[in-house]
Amino acid sequence: MAMTGGEYVLKSAAAHSIGVCFANPGTTEMALVDALDATPQVRGVLGLFEGVCTGMADGYARMTGKPALTMLHLGVGLGNGIANLHNARRAYSPIVNLVGDHPQEHLPYDAPLTSDIATMAAPVSDWVGAGGRVAALPEAFRHAADSAGQRPGGIATLILPADVMAADVGELGEPEAREVRRRPVDAGAVERVAKIVAEKRGAGLLLGGTALLRESLKQLEAVARKTGAQLLAEPFPARMDRGAGLPDLIRLPYFPEAVLERLQGFDTLVLVGAKPPVSFFKYPGYPSSLVPESCRVETLCAPDEDAAAYAAALAEALGAAGGNGGSTGPERPDAPSGALTTKSLGQAVAAALPEHAIIADESATSGGPAYHLTKQGPAHSAMYLTGGGIGMGLPAATGAAVACPDRPVLALQADGGGMYTLQALWTQAREGLNVTNVILVNRKYQILQVEHGRASQSGMGETARGLTELRDPELDWCALAQGMGVAPRRPQSAEGLHTALKNSLEEPGPSLIEVVLE
Amino acid sequence: MAMTGGEYVLKSAAAHSIGVCFANPGTTEMALVDALDATPQVRGVLGLFEGVCTGMADGYARMTGKPALTMLHLGVGLGNGIANLHNARRAYSPIVNLVGDHPQEHLPYDAPLTSDIATMAAPVSDWVGAGGRVAALPEAFRHAADSAGQRPGGIATLILPADVMAADVGELGEPEAREVRRRPVDAGAVERVAKIVAEKRGAGLLLGGTALLRESLKQLEAVARKTGAQLLAEPFPARMDRGAGLPDLIRLPYFPEAVLERLQGFDTLVLVGAKPPVSFFKYPGYPSSLVPESCRVETLCAPDEDAAAYAAALAEALGAAGGNGGSTGPERPDAPSGALTTKSLGQAVAAALPEHAIIADESATSGGPAYHLTKQGPAHSAMYLTGGGIGMGLPAATGAAVACPDRPVLALQADGGGMYTLQALWTQAREGLNVTNVILVNRKYQILQVEHGRASQSGMGETARGLTELRDPELDWCALAQGMGVAPRRPQSAEGLHTALKNSLEEPGPSLIEVVLE
């Protein structure tokens, strides 16, 4: 049966239960684009910029645990997607990047769009390979799927020459359904750590990755109840399930002195899918490692292992399975009134948040109250800026909405980072996704002003300050939303914000709420 | 005297006559940002996305021949700038990227924003180096300046750890003014090629790089008049001076069969700063090399050499100096009337174009008539999509306006590529730049539909077509412009477009004209 290389790749994806491709194709990817019509199991979602595509794939992966494809145009398309691939990699999100390339015979001629794709991909990929010949396609895709499809996942970048994608590869036969083999849980580690946790009452369990999903949190809460251990979360979880019915854990803060203070008093810190705490940036007078000297670090499992499986095994080993999560129903603050501040924003979000919502949190310096006030709210999931590269929030919210069409998505997006990948709004409109984009407008890169204050006794000079301010002109986010077909709202008070949030979250389709903070 | 590493770097830039820094800084670059206040010789220009910063640096370099700095935040910031660095590199634009990094001692801790910056930079850099220690700064900057400051230029990426930038480096002393040493013209090559051009009447001179600037074009026109040679231009020049007083040369077309047809009949092709013609993409049945078999290729100078100097030397060797360019005054079409089409757009542009304007041309499939109708218009300069990575137009127009405040800038920007780096509009507004952004709206990635038609007998499937269409919803470019503080216009007819163009080009500050093509 005739089948193009592009069809073979997409059918291989389908055989690995990969069902979405976030795409911005070019000429070298046309056979892959054509293949979408022949492979209805893979849904093509268009992004108007590759950084939107990779960020959508990240959000999709965080909410499903499953890889999505991206389709990127040569080195330049990959380049545009790099920052959100960095974020995805730091979040251990499974992604298979399909990057088109010139036919190999064309590469020596150094045509304008030729570049060293493999080298460019390396810093943001766990695996880079090429389907440079028809015969190599099956194994190349299997490698890519295996690299991406671990739990937690990795970034696989598969470079696909245009001629191979257009070739008839009927001789390869239909790709067969296939499961990715996963590394088993190390029973010895579980036994060893269970003993430590049981003996050392009051150990800290620092959770990362899938240990922060609902089932694991319930199991680990039972462990904590039984052993006196305390649950902590890494500072920027890829995804953390939260709210009613889940334990109130301590999420590690951003600045080193605050982390050290939080960890003071723990004599044992057990890593469950988290890395040992390190300072986000290096500051004079503070160490890079934020483990207090008196604290011993034990590893149940590393961030690249299946933390949820280890959490379940630990609970079982301690006879602590069957925890109920420990807390009662949701508590909501009253709807706020008065001025628009980070506090009234937090109240409005907590008062309006629907059950099972997803929050894409790139709120930067404006999100503290919203974070704290939703802690005991209705059950929800939240994604944070794991890799630190701004511009993740709107695309990740979009990808999460593709992943979970039944869950309302709330993006809490600081204005500076929002401008990086604002094109995501258009995809939301095109796909009719239920995303409420709350833009937190302080008209500055506030974190830089905060960091400057920490680093320097003297104030900022006029030029330096100018480079951290988004003024002259002010951005009009409502107009930007309208430009991309998304309905905008600009409430003038906390009451108005609360109403806008409730309405936006209930209505189908995307909306944008511009919140100009005092 | 106390001086920070950041001040040393910016003063080194000033000592190399580098006067602008296109910046989007983060925490690791704060000492560099502070240094701008201490170094008023270097103007900081903020872009709201790093791809805008690198594209602005490219446009600036194309118009001045001088390097600008970029200031980028770690690997993620560099990543966002990669596509336009690819374009800049293909255009031989001189740029010095300053990329902040963590202090070296912090790198082993693998903090969230840590990445392999040097590897990521390699595919888009002619030189990558690090100012990892205070003592290494002077030589590192000299290397960077030498790599960038050749004529034509290169991309130098200098990785600067935050602690070195914040350190007191007073012991280094003030950087001294310094000229970059440039490679001399190879007199032997000039003599050899002069002989060939003189003997072989009717040779083709394929011009690239600085051979396409005004003075060189006049000299080469004299060569052509004297020897019967014909002038050709590479298909996507970094900058080409055009219009009245300059020769009417043949710019090579895009598709291979058209290039081969153009070059048929030449038995000698002399490369003057151009590469041998190659197919932009590889198509079955067409070769990669587009030099006809009967044609001999001779090289006066390669693209990484100073083509303007070679052009002058060639003219002198042939006793052909002092050409007047050969053509007479500007010819303008009448202002058009009727519907908005690529033809009436071209007429309106040609009728309204002011003397000494700069055109940033990323018009893709909509720009043919505008190109041809401005050929004999008033003298102007035009920049094209040399590297093929879309999203260059609006940033390059912005950088060109920073470079040439006395010249009106006209961006002819296709809608698909325009969405890649639309944040450039905000920088135009903030800096009060006289840029007229004409958005050519056909609501599709039309080139993909054209390429699909070439590649396939059958029509596009519904899904494939959907991935090449910018519909549902339609973009509202006027709203997008308003969102970034740029005055929008949406003419409904060719007359209205002509008026809008005249007004926009005359008014100070930026504007955007949305042209919905029939």
Image (cartoon, coloured by chain):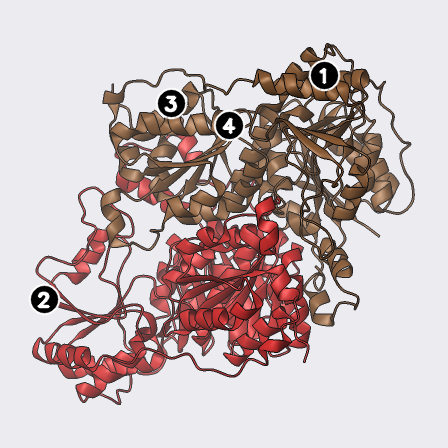
Chain colours: A red, B brown
Residue for point 43% across, 70% down: A148
Q: Quadrant of the N terminus of chain B?
A: top left
The Cα atoms of the two marked residues, 2 and 4, are separated by: 55 Å
Residue pointed to by mark 3? B11
Compare marks 4 and 3 and give the one earlier in the sequence: 3
The answer to whether mark 4 and mark 1 are in CB contact below 8 A is: no
Residue B352: quadrant of the picture: top right
Q: Position of residue B118 (x, y in %)?
A: 38, 44
- The label nearer to you, 4 versus 3, is 4
**Contact between labelled residues 2 and 3, with CB atoms less than 8 Å apart:** no
Depth check, front residue: A224 or B125: B125
Tell me which amino acid carries mark 1: Gln
Placement of B357 over or under B55, stated as above or below: above
Q: Is residue A329 above or below residue A466?
A: below
Question: Which chain's residue wears label 2?
Answer: A
Residue A327 can be seen in this image:
no
Which residue bears the numbered disc 4? B67
Q: Which residue is mark 1?
A: B219
The residue lying toward the viewer, choosing from B75 and A139, is: A139
In the image, residue A428 above or below residue B436: below
Question: Mark 1 or mark 3: which is in front?
Answer: 1
Check residue A267 in the rendering and tell me which mark sits there, or answer none: 2
Tag 2–tag 4 contact (CB < 8 Å): no
